[in-house]
Amino acid sequence: MTENAQTLTEKEILELKELCNEMRKDVVSMIHAAKSGHPGGNLSAVEIFAVLYKKCIKICPEWDKSSDFDKRDRFVLSKGHASAALYSILARCGYFSVDELLNFRKLGSNLQGHPSCRHAKGVEVSTGSLGQGLSMACGIALGLRLDKNPATVYVYLGDGEMQEGSVWEAVMNASHHNLNNIIAFIDRNRLQIDGNTENIKAIEPLADKLEAFGWNVIEIDGHDVEEIYEAVCSAKTMDRPTAIIANTIKGKGVSYMENNAGWHGKAPNDAEYETAMKELSR
Amino acid sequence: MLSKDSSKEKKSIRSEYGKTLVELGHKNKNIVVLDADLSCSTQTAMFGKEFPDRFFNIGIAEQDAMTTAAGLSTTGKIPFVSTFAMFATGRAYDQIRNSICYPKFNVKIVATHGGITVGEDGASHQALEDVALMRLIPNMTVIVPADCVETREVIKFAAEYKGPVYIRLARTNVVNIFDPEKYKFDPKKALIVKEGKSVTLVSNGETLTETLDCAELLEKQGIEAEVIHMPVVKPIDKETLIASAKKTNRVITVENHSIIGGIGSAVCETLSENYPVKVTRIGIADEFGQSGEQRALMNFYKLTGECLAERIAKSL
């Protein structure tokens, strides 16, 4: 973790970009091997996970052994279907081996289809049923505050997930308690399973809504590692909870998946896999 | 074990819950309490007054309350979440299943106003299916205490036990069945409250009082009923149940809950697999409740000691 620096160096940016490319290959390979999964919403999350785990989150891969375990920052993947990208970054941070990634979604695997904290090392809480991660984050944040623990709680929501009423219960709860130790990312890739969020049940004007609920809101390009990093640095100085609306591209990095709702929950076949890996190796 | 207090004074189970929470709160600073705008009814307000920093009124947002409790438990806190049984188990079922039980988080759900005796508020507020819903979820322990003495011990047990617990409390004030000096709660054991050999009556919660009254009336007719109190619906004490069924060869369950999915079903499941005998389930049939004064409802649904005795005597 980089302490205090508010910007990334050229070298860090380059390393993160390379890591993101590897993570994209992980995601495509995992979903291809599992013959199921959610490529679109995993590929849109890659840069944010990379920046958080490599530069922001105080992580603790050897968490059973460390006395600092309680001081770690927490990450809640509210959109649990972005599990492949989460497992990828966890493996690349040393929580388990990269080889294990290909067991994703298979019988007996620790890498369940949606993250389970009783299975995979590094997963803080089990998620998958949408609309619950922000409440979970509020509970963690309240607990940390009671203990005067300065750790930050990061939570990652889908944009379609904002249609769940329970998210707004939690949005209200976070601002009521002024939980400035919560930083929530909203993966604004604009697509959900059945199509464009605005055609199905519009969530816009999202920033205005969140501000009206008492949140600090930052909008960024969710694929720009510098913007992600700077947004987190800024959020940490706030006296209110912060929502970072990350404008992203669903399926980012694989041409035929980009901006295509059809790739929300479908695995690539062998030929599509080859094409994707070729594109990601360029 | 049984109370020697002959005054038959009715006491509030909910107040006992509130008092016990305060007591536990003094002993263990990790205990936190959440409510969903019903803290004066559930009596968690007592804890809120004593420990404002550890009390979270989440407002009318049961889903948020359950998952917030789950989050708090990950930081080593022991959250007790309370609201009416209807909203706890109905509104927030998914949160309880996925955010509490699946990860086996240390959250205690203490739901009040279980059963038909919610009274005048009527069907929308009468949870007749909460035990069934909670019993279905893996990792969940389900307890329905019968009186204030037992409620206190059950709450203390829940605070010590590591894992999710659902405790169903009645709105009704009840007579103390157990002696506070002698009663000990054992999560693995059902209690034979009265021995007998003609028929086994299994009950819990506020219907235990009625079942004991019923047994007394049956006794006068020469029917020696064995009364088993089964506060822990899950995991069920198979041994005590099977042993009694072997003795009487006739079992009747009594509950303030739908006859589908509650203690009646749990008893049928256990006996049909281990020692099949005829079981009659008495409770609320497959229907919604309705408004009415508590006692009037108990009479209407034939759950009073007298109604039970009449029905059971005829059926034997």
Image (cartoon, coloured by chain):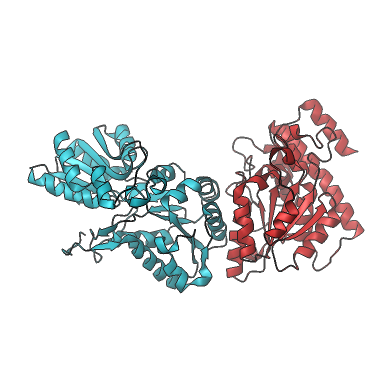
Chain colours: A red, B cyan
Residue that appears at 14% across and 35% down? B314
Q: Is residue B130 above or below residue B29?
A: above
Residue B75, given in percent of the width and then of the height, sits at 57, 62
Q: Can the viewer see residue A124 in this picture?
A: no
Residue at image location 17% in from the left, 46% down from the top = B306
Location of the C terminus of chain A (image quadrant): top right
Tell me the residue at 30%/51% (across/down). B205
Instruction: Judge from the rendering whether residue B305 lies leftward or rightward of residue A71; answer left or right.
Output: left
Q: Does A160 appear above or below A135? A: above
Between B117 and B121, which is closer to the camera in this rendering? Answer: B121
Please, is residue A2 above or below residue A160 in the view?
A: below
Image location of residue A42, percent across then percent down: 74, 42
| Image-based side of B223 in relation to A100, left or right | left
Up the image or down, A88 lies above or below B162; here it is above
Count of numbered badges drawn on the protein: 0
Query: Quadrant of residue A254 in the image?
Result: top right
Q: Where on the picture, by quarter, is residue A217?
A: bottom right
Residue A262 placed where, x, y %? Answer: 74, 32
Residue under the point 83% across and 49% down: A223
Q: Which quadrant: the N terminus of chain A? A: bottom right
Relative to residue B108, is residue B63 drawn left or right? Answer: right
Q: Nearer the viewer, residue B206 or B159?
A: B206
Q: Is residue B274 visible?
A: yes
